[in-house]
Amino acid sequence: MNRTLLFSFAATLGTSAFAQPMCQPIAARCEAHITANYIPDGQFYRALLQGDESATFDLTLFGGTTYRVAACSGESDGILIFNVYDRSPEHNLLFTNKDQNNAPYWDLAIASTIDVTMEANLDPSKAGSGCAVMLIGFKK
Amino acid sequence: MSAYKQFPKALGIGLTVLLAACGGPGNEGDSQQVDTLAQGSNDQAQVIGLGGKLFSIPSPVQTALAIRKAGLKYQKDLAIPLDKGETLTTKAAQSLALGMYGADLAYVTVHRDGARAIATMQVIERLGSAIGVSNAFDRTLIERFKTNMNNEDSLLRFSGTAFRAADQYLKENQSEDISALVLAGGWIESLYLTISDAAALKDQTMVDRIGEQKNTLSALVGLIAATEKDGNAAALLTSLKELQAEFAAVSSTYIFEKPVTDASAKTTYINSKSTVTIPADKVASITAKVAALRNMILA
């Protein structure tokens, strides 16, 4: 029973005290990429990733809008890879920052409203695990 | 897996946490690849990332801008009465209301109703304090609002940054359920502001915007279902699923076109084409459902 209690304690400690100090500086650095020309979407996307794990989320990007996506991990830019796919059965790749030297931010100019899936994973040559933070802003 | 088998792993996580809090383990530079998580810490990814699945809800600011762009008349009375926030006593209702007032804030701000924006910020400050995110919505923010009253871009950026800070705080403090309710409130109120103007329902761009919410609603249902605790969002979830049934009649088309990237501008132009169609009778039923849902939350 004592071991069960210790497990609960450790797990709780692991998800609160651990995540905050790790993600906080990454979030602060990532915010700098959502510059004054962009309005933050009001949400904070983050996941703790290990190995080849991916974090994904679906979102609707509205036509006529330019979005800025910032993706950060670790102690410097270029560690997090993010891919944007459409949600058609073909799952077409619309953008990957892997083709842009793992750029920490990129703008997506949307012609017509589109449902997409964003996927983030660590560049295995740069990090084995870490906190992944993504932020989104848009131009008015 | 028994608690005994999990014990070494749990101990490892706990020790790593303690080391991290003390600034260790400090092996930077040993390798180009950096491991900033403890080995075998999949439990953390599961809890924090909800199994690697994150959720995104469009910003209420985008809807408010679309309403203004469509040339719809500003109707102050569509926003929630300012004194309503005082009457809500449960954390779930206060969280939903925080998101709803956030959508109202965007609506009144883009229509340059400065007095109402300040008053709405004050309600948001009180609700934020009630649900434990007073760090994001404080007096400083209100003062910044007052001193930038004539700069709409700054106001929208301040509120977006404040809501993001609140979201971050909630997610980092095991309050994903509260975070989800704030997002839900913002989405519901945005949709209400869109559909409550009869003129919007005659504007094809706005009708399309309503239809384009179909997948967001699915994401919202998934988010609430994944984060709900103690049944505090059971009625909301039921209502959202009923609304989802109405949205099932919304159809769409999509034609993929190859994106064009301008690397020097760090921009990719996504040129795929889409259309959305809502049967006329469904516009009416969606309107009724959204109004009923809003009334339920504010009752």
Image (cartoon, rainbow, N blue to C red):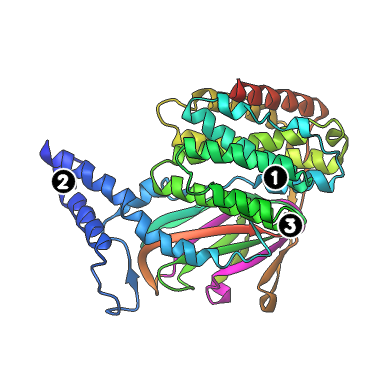
Asked if B160 appears above or below B82 in the picture, the reply is below
* Residue located beneath label 3 in the image: B151
Give the x, y percent position of residue B162: 56, 51
Left/right of residue A32 with respect to residue B293 in the rendered view: left
> What kind of residue is marked 1?
Ala
Q: CA distance from mark 2 to mark 1?
A: 51 Å
Q: Is residue A106 magenta?
A: yes
Mark positioned earlier in the residue sequence (2 or 3)? 2
Q: Disc 2 sits on a residue from what chain? A: B
Task: Say which residue appears at 60% left-offset and 36% top-offset.
Answer: B123
**Camera sees residue A52:** no
Task: Say which residue appears at 59% left-offset and 25% top-offset.
Answer: B297
Q: Disc 1 sits on a residue from what chain? A: B
Locate the N terminus of chain B by quadrant: top left
Q: Is residue B4 magenta?
A: no
Asked if B84 appears above or below B210 in the picture, the reply is above
> What kind of residue is marked 3?
Asn
* Residue located beneath label 2 in the image: B5
**Disc 3 element:** loop
Q: CA distance from mark 3 to mark 1?
A: 13 Å
Mark positioned earlier in the residue sequence (2 or 1)? 2
> What kind of residue is marked 2?
Lys
Give the x, y percent position of residue B78: 75, 31
Q: Which mark is residue A39?
A: none
* Residue located beneath label 1 in the image: B106
| Count of marks overlaid on the render | 3
Mark positioned earlier in the residue sequence (3 or 1)? 1
Q: CA distance from mark 2 to mark 3?
A: 59 Å
Q: Which residues are magenta?
A: A98-123
**Disc 2 element:** helix
